[in-house]
Image (tube, rainbow, N blue to C red):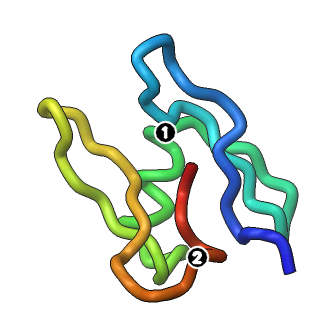
Amino acid sequence: MPKRIEVIQESKTGRNEKFKDNLTNKVMTRPQFVKEIKNGNYENYTVKKINNLETPVSKPDKKRNNNLG
């Protein structure tokens, strides 16, 4: 089973900037994915402020299939 969310673009500094939902084929920017997470549409992910920027991250668990990267 492929990862539900895949990072498809990173910035030059390595920040994840574009994401693809492999279930729906929806492509989202970082701000769009943050909004979807906050709306409760991706329960295995959460939002953290990293360098004062809202950033999607996987919720900690032992699964490797939902890790971003």
User: Would you say 1 lies left or right of 56 here?
Assistant: right
Where residue 17 sits in the image (x, y, percent)?
53, 31
Q: Secondary structure at mark 1?
A: helix
Task: Tell me the tag on residue 66.
Answer: none
Where residue 10 sits in the image (x, y, percent)?
56, 26
Query: With respect to residue 69, does 58 lie above or below?
Result: below
To which residue does mark 1 refer? 30
To which residue does mark 2 refer? 64
Mark 2 crowdedness (10 Å alpha carbons): few <14, some 14-19, many ≥20? few
Q: Residue furthest bottom?
A: 62
Of the numbered discs 1 and 2, the one sitting upstream in the chain is 1
Alpha-carbon span between mark 1 and mark 2: 21 Å
Residue type at the position of mark 1: Arg
Query: With respect to residue 49, does 62 lie above or below?
Result: below
User: Would you say 30 lies left or right of 61 here?
Assistant: right
Residue type at the position of mark 2: Arg
Where residue 62 sits in the image (x, y, percent)?
46, 88
Identified at 53% across, 75% down, the residue is 42
Q: Residue furthest top?
A: 12
Query: With respect to residue 36, does 61 lie above or below?
Result: below
Identified at 48% across, 80% down, the residue is 44
Where residue 60 sits in the image (x, y, percent)?
34, 78
Identified at 54% across, 85% down, the residue is 63
Quarter of the N terminus within the rendering: bottom right
